[in-house]
Image: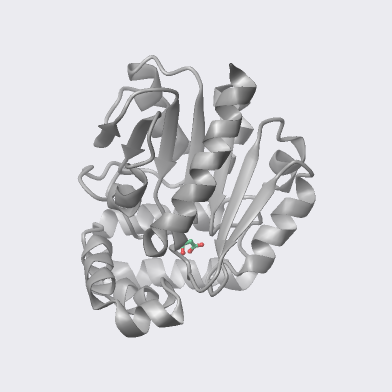
């Protein structure tokens, strides 16, 4: 697999790879790029952001695109951070390439597979996109992205997130929905996880509620969990100050451990 993704790169130091959720892009991490002392690697998955679409229908395929980017940069270990679908991908990387992991950050995500109903809903969404385009996804999902106060008062953030979501290509949305519907349970990956894990969840997340993060913490005795009060599904975008504080202190402890 040759490198093929648009990748935003910033900073110097140990690598942190940030993997966006659905239907979003590398812009999701704009506020995390200020975290100092690390090399930020932020890809757009195929069909998202600035990466043209190419076929993928499983998280394993998506993983191979990301790993090719790391190989092209001679990066042999990194901290992998994922939001929601990005978290599903990070757990897939942990399953397939545990040797690449320095640490893991899972934000507003879960380790379980889709229920039969969730899977059915995704396949219906695929059929609808094929018929009508992906526009309806933005209207369906946008109100669930943030906490109540943000939805009521932060028009600018809601507007810029709408435009990030609207930039997703039809083919990219279909690929991601199929990949998410196809994914298996990753509880065993968490149980085996041998590197530090930071879990972050918005207290008002209605897509992946805090109970999901609590369940993941129960599988990994050494994990830390930070709940961001009042944040919704995109806690890192909505409350960058608190999120970055938790991440910076996790990365500092990790650096001390590795040096
Ligand atoms: C995401 O934010 O990536 C999606 O909501 C995840 C999902 O649909 O399971």
Task: Say which of 219 and 53 sits in front.
Answer: 219
Would you place residue 236 above or below residue 39 in this image?
below
| Residue 100, percent from left and from top | 55, 24
Is residue 133 shown left or right of residue 251? left
Tell me which residue sits at (39%, 65%) in the image: 238
Is residue 8 shown left or right of residue 184? left
Quadrant in which the N terminus appears: top left
Task: Say which of 153 and 143 sits in front.
Answer: 153
| Residue 248, percent from left and from top | 49, 41
Tell me which residue sits at (42%, 62%) in the image: 239
Is residue 39 shown left or right of residue 93? left
| Residue 99, percent from left and from top | 60, 21
Tell me which residue sits at (29%, 76%) in the image: 154
Is residue 213 shown left or right of residue 172? right
Task: Say which of 255 and 103 sits in front.
Answer: 255
Quadrant hosting residue 149: bottom left
Quadrant hosting residue 190: top right
């Amino acid at each position: 697999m040759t490198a093929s993704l648009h990748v935003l790169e910033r900073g110097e130091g140990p690598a942190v790879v940030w993997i966006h959720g659905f239907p979003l892009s590398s812009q999701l991490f704009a506020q995390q790029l200020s975290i100092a002392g690390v090399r930020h690697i932020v890809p757009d998955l195929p069909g998202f952001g600035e990466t043209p679409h190419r076929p993928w229908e499983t998280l394993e395929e998506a993983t191979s695109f990301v790993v090719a980017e790391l190989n092209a940069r001679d990066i042999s270990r990194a901290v992998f951070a994922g939001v929601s679908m990005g978290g599903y991908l990070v757990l897939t990387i942990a399953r397939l390439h545990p040797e690449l992991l320095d640490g893991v950050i899972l934000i507003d995500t879960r380790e379980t597979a889709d229920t039969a109903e969730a899977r059915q809903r995704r396949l219906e969404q695929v059929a609808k996109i094929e018929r009508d385009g992906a526009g309806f996804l933005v209207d369906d999902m946008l109100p669930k992205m943030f906490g109540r106060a943000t939805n009521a008062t932060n028009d600018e953030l809601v507007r810029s997130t709408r435009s990030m979501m609207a930039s997703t290509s039809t083919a990219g949305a279909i690929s991601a929905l199929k990949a998410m519907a196809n994914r298996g349970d990753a509880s065993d990956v968490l149980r085996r996880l041998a590197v530090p894990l930071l879990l972050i969840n918005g207290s008002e997340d209605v897509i992946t509620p805090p109970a999901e993060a609590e369940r993941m913490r129960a599988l990994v005795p050494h994990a830390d969990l930070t709940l961001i009060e009042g944040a919704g599904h995109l806690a890192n975008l909505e409350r960058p100050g608190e999120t970055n504080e938790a991440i910076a202190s996790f990365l500092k402890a990790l650096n001390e451990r590795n040096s």
